[in-house]
Structures are given as structure tokens and as C-alpha cells.
Amino acid sequence: MFSSLSPEMLKVTGVLLILLGLFYLFRMYQALVKGKITYWAGWAPVTLISPWTCFVNANPKSLVKSKEAMWVHIVMTPMFLISAALCICAGLDLIGLPGVQYLNDAFGGAHGPKAITFSLRNGYNFPFIGKAVVNFGKAMASGQMGISKKDEMYEKSNQSLGDATRN
């Protein structure tokens, strides 16, 4: 994937990705502290991705708008944090530093399983997604989430809901 690029282009791309990650950290700060997001209020599909691509400030005479709301704190802060972490780690990998190793150490410690892998030939892989899907599927198939008896909020009954309302 990246193996066809020259070493100089890899370094330039890496530095640009690190700068983009730092921009996303600034956007995360705005979302976390101020609850503010800047977006382009044009065509709807572009509006959905515009918080990641809008690099100018809001202006009343343009389609670039700014919004302050509580949902921004909750939804956009983690999204910008994940975007920043991935961009910075990808940039570090492309300039020759161990970015994915730093991210894996942050996720699972130095000796934990690898959540993300990177190679210049194949790019990035996310093996933790496959494991999470399998575990989630098993939990859904069993119909039980493993709640202990003392943590249950109500008594279990073998009656159906229809039987319980007729009594």
C-alpha cells in the first residue's frame, strides 16, 4: 500500500498526517471544553463529513457554520480523539517511529494483545474488531449477558408477558 512511495514522500505524508492529527486534537478540545463544532452547511452527505474536512472558521456570510450543543461534548469529542490518535500514529509510522506500538501500549500495556498492526506493504489491520464481533455475537446468541443474581433488578419469571397481565 505505502511501499510504492519514495522514502521522502513517506516522510512528507507522515508529517502531514501528524499535523492533521494535531488539528483534530484542537477540534477535540473545542468539542470537549466549549461544546463547539464547525461544519459546512451545504449538501447533506458532505455536511456529515465536514467536521473533519472544514479547516476555516465560521463566517456569517458563508456556508461554514458553528454549532454549540451538549451532544457535541458527548459524540464528537471521542470521534475527534480517535481520529487524532489514528492520524498521529499513522504519521509516526510513516516517518519511521513506532506509532502503532505506542497506541497498542496505551490500549493493552506493553505485553497485551495487539489491537492494531501496521506494515508498509499491507497497511493497517484491526484484529481486535474481529474478536469483538465474535464475542458480541456469542453474547447475543446466548441471550444472557452474564449478570449475577445479586445485580438483577427484578425477579425472573417463567411466565410470558401475556400470562402475567391476565392474572
Image (cartoon, helix red, strand yellow):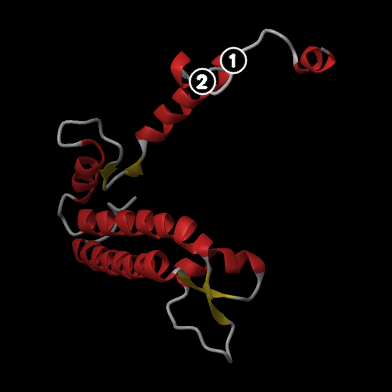
Quick check: can you spot residue 148? no
Name above or below for residue 77 compared with residue 55. above
Residue at mark 2: 152
| Disc 2 to disc 1: CB gap under 8 Å | yes
Please state which of residues 110 and 46 is positioned toward the viewer in this rendering. 110
Local crowd at mark 1 within 10 Å, few (<14), some, or many (≥20)? few
Q: Which residue is mark 1?
A: 155
Q: Give the Cα separation between the discs numbered 2 and 1.
A: 7 Å
Asked if residue 53 is positioned above or below residue 112 in the image, the reply reads: below
Rendered location of residue 140, percent (x, y):
55, 22
Query: Camera-side residue: 144 or 110?
Result: 144
Q: Position of residue 14 (x, y in %)?
A: 25, 63
Q: Say whether residue 158 is left or right of residue 141.
A: right
Judged left or right of residue 51, residue 119 is left
**Secondary structure of the residue carrying numbered label 1:** loop
Residue at image position (19%, 41%) is 105
- The residue lying toward the viewer, choosing from 62 and 117, is 62
- Which residue is at the front of the view, 131 or 66? 66
Point out the residue furthest to the right here: 166
Quadrant location of the C terminus in the rendered image: top right
Asked whether, in this view, residue 121 is left or right of residue 138, the answer is left
The vertical placement of 40 against 79, above or below, is: below
Amino acid at the residue labelled 1: Glu
Q: Residue furthest bottom?
A: 61
Question: How far across and down, in percent of the image, does residue 7 sit?
Answer: 19, 61
Crowding near the residue tagged with mark 2, few <14, some 14–19, many ≥20 C-alpha atoms within 10 Å: few
The three-letter amino acid code for the residue at tag 2 is Glu
Q: Is residue 141 visible?
A: yes
Where residue 115 sits, quadrant-wise, is top left
Q: Position of residue 94 (x, y in %)?
A: 23, 57
Q: Is residue 23 above or below residue 102?
A: below
Q: Residue furthest front?
A: 167
